[in-house]
Amino acid sequence: MNAAATPQFTIAALEDGTLDVDAFDHEAHVYVAWLYLEQFPLLDAIARFTSALQRLTARLGIPGKYHETVSLFFMLLIADRRTSTKGKDWLSFHRNNGDLFCRKHSIINRYYSSGLLASDRARQSFVLPDRLTA
């Protein structure tokens, strides 16, 4: 996905299940999370986004793909990053937060061990990070 090519990914498309799931990559997930945080207070945004993701994975027959800790961690991280770029558009957010989009060296690995992330506990319930960051 290209940061400028985001119109196909909307809250409505996620919630009604009409988005192109083949193109719904990590960057698109971050974009839609950013949209939720633009439109709703934090707790409402989290509840709506995670519920929509769970419905989507259930509809696709892959409910086990949903990961509660990863979803909440990224929502909280995006919300925190938005405070330093408040009032700016998506392209500014994307440009200023490139580390949120790196898949090979995902930012989540700075906070969580792979063992914890792979656990059923972390997949089903939010768990706090088990790594200290600098």
Image (cartoon, helix red, strand yellow):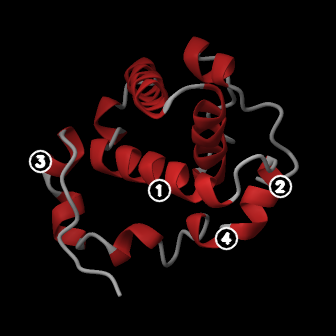
Q: Quadrant of the C terminus?
A: bottom left
Mark earlier in primary sequence (4, 1): 1
Mark earlier in primary sequence (3, 1): 1
Mark earlier in primary sequence (4, 3): 4
Q: Is residue 24 visible?
A: no
Indicate left or right for 89 with 51 as reference.
right
Dot 3: element: helix
Name the residue beneath numbered marker 4.
Answer: 98
Q: Nearer the viewer, mark 4 or mark 1?
A: 1
Q: Nearer the viewer, mark 2 or mark 3?
A: 2
Q: Nearer the viewer, mark 3 or mark 1?
A: 1
- Whether residues under marks 3 and 1 lie with C-beta atoms below 8 angstroms apart, the answer is no
The disc placed on residue 53 is: none
* Residue 100 found in image quarter: bottom right
Indicate left or right for 10 with 71 as reference.
right
The disc placed on residue 91 is: 2
Q: Disc 4 and disc 1: Cα gap in Å?
A: 13 Å
**134 and 29: which is toward the camera:** 134
The disc placed on residue 121 is: 3
Q: Is residue 30 visible?
A: yes
How far across and down, in percent of the image, does residue 113 sit? Answer: 23, 73
Q: Nearer the viewer, mark 4 or mark 3?
A: 4
Dot 2: element: helix
Name the residue beneath numbered marker 1.
Answer: 77
